[in-house]
Each structure stands twice: as structure tokens, then as C-alpha cells.
Amino acid sequence: MNIEQLVVFLLIGGVAGWLAGLIIKSRRFGIIWNIVVGVIGSVLGGWIFGELGISVGGKWMGPLVTATAGAIVLLFAISLVQKK
């Protein structure tokens, strides 16, 4: 992974984490938390979509949709754990 790919990965992760936070209406933690949630969400979303056989195409929208879906699942799971 070169520096350009890393920047794009972090950018998509940040946007995905921010979008997931808006959708779930979670507390806002800032750009670093958004990137962390988005990056973990991209891995989780990729795994979930792969298991379900879902393929979202596109150069930017596909990874963004996948990462956002994974980040939503992650934030929802975190909110369930915090309520207990």
C-alpha cells in the first residue's frame, strides 16, 4: 500500500464513520474516532457483504457504502453493549 492508497483509505474511513455517526445519532468524537470507526467498519462491512454475496461496484461509492454499512453495524453493537 503506497501513501496515496493510505490517504484514500483514511479519507473513505473518515467519511464513512461520520455518515454512520449521523445515521445512528451517536455522540460525536471527532475526526480520529470517525476514521477509526470507518476503517473498522470497512473491514466489517467487507466481511458481511462478502458472506451475503453482495457486491457494490464503483471506484468511490462502493467502498464508501461498504464502510458506512459496516460502521453502522459497529456503532449499533457498541450502543447495545453500553446500555447494559
Image: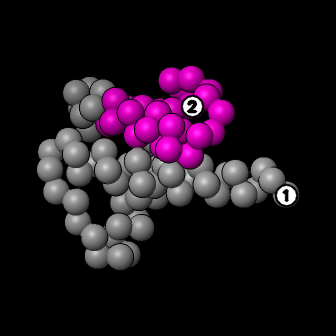
* Disc number placed over residue 56 in the picture, else none: none
* Disc number placed over residue 33 in the picture, else none: 2
| Residue 66 vertical position relative to residue 59 in the rendered view, above or below | below
Residue nearer the viewer, 7 or 20: 20
The amino acid type found where label 2 is placed reads: Trp
Q: Residue at coordinates 70% horizontally, 51% vertically from top-left?
A: 79
Give the magenta range.
9-35
The amino acid type found where label 1 is placed reads: Lys
Q: Position of residue 33 (x, y in %)?
A: 57, 31
* Disc number placed over residue 84 in the picture, else none: 1
Q: Residues within 10 Å of mark 2 (few under 14, many from 20)?
A: some
Closer to the N terminus: mark 2 or mark 1?
A: 2
Q: Position of residue 57 (x, y in %)?
A: 16, 56
The quarter holding residue 10 reads: top left
Answer whether residue 28 is visible to the viewer in this image: yes
Q: Residue at coordinates 53% horizontally, 39% vertically from top-left?
A: 21
Horizontal side of residue 26 vs 6, given as left or right: right
Q: Residue at coordinates 56% horizontally, 23% vertically from top-left?
A: 30
